[in-house]
Amino acid sequence: MSASFPLTRRKAGRFWIILACLLCLGGAVGLVLNALSSTIVFFMAPSQVLAHPPAPTRTIRLGGMVVAGSLHTGRASDDTPEARFDVTDGQAAVTVQYRGILPDLFREGQSVVALGRYDGHGFTASEVLAKHDETYMPKEVAEALQKSGRWDPRFGPPPNAADWNSMTVPHPDTPPGPGAAP
């Protein structure tokens, strides 16, 4: 004898209601995840940007230290301030173009986080965030410096601004500076 469990009309109705609720819940979760994935902004260090360039349409946060001597300012044709500077994590540097007024705390040799897009040649920032005081460094920038091996917090504060010019990796075609070993 085989035991069969026929579904009564009441049980079948309950089953279809539960199935419909689960499908609606799954659809809602899918829509929320899709919406969130397009608004997430990832932090990247300059060496990560150059090693794995993001899509030109992808907005990212680029963080590092402003290379001393790299800041160039001017005015656009509509009299809007423009700035160009290099950001480094100690391993690589990316040139940042920014159109607007830089924060009051923006300085060469200080940590910075720029929000914008990388097009394969340079980074166009829509927003530039500067550090708060002489001891503050964004968590992401500190992690990038530690990961690059350029700074270990166990041995003191981050390198001072004057050392950042020598911390970028020179281009292979650049001749060594005076006093460099052959």
Image (tube, rainbow, N blue to C red):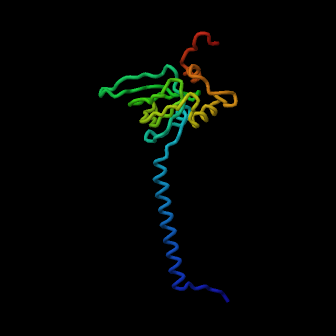
Identify which residue is drawn at 49% across, 71% down.
Answer: 20
User: Front-most of 8 and 99?
Assistant: 99
The location of residue 101, given as percent across then percent down, is 40, 30
User: Front-most of 167 and 163?
Assistant: 163
The location of residue 64, given as percent across then percent down, is 54, 31
Identify which residue is drawn at 50% across, 29% down.
Answer: 94
Residue sitting farthest toward the bottom: 1
Q: Say how many tags the image has.
A: 0
Residue sitting farthest toward the left: 78
Identify which residue is drawn at 53% across, 77% down.
Answer: 15
Which quarter shows the C terminus? Answer: top right
The location of residue 30, given as percent across then percent down, is 49, 59
Residue sitting farthest toward the right: 154
Vertical placement of 80 versus 175: above or below?
below
The location of residue 155, given as percent across then percent down, is 69, 27
Q: Is 167 positioned to the left or the right of 62 in the image?
A: right
Residue sitting farthest toward the front: 133
Which quarter shows the N terminus? Answer: bottom right
Vertical placement of 13 versus 78: above or below?
below
Quarter location, residue 48: top right
Quarter location, residue 159: top right
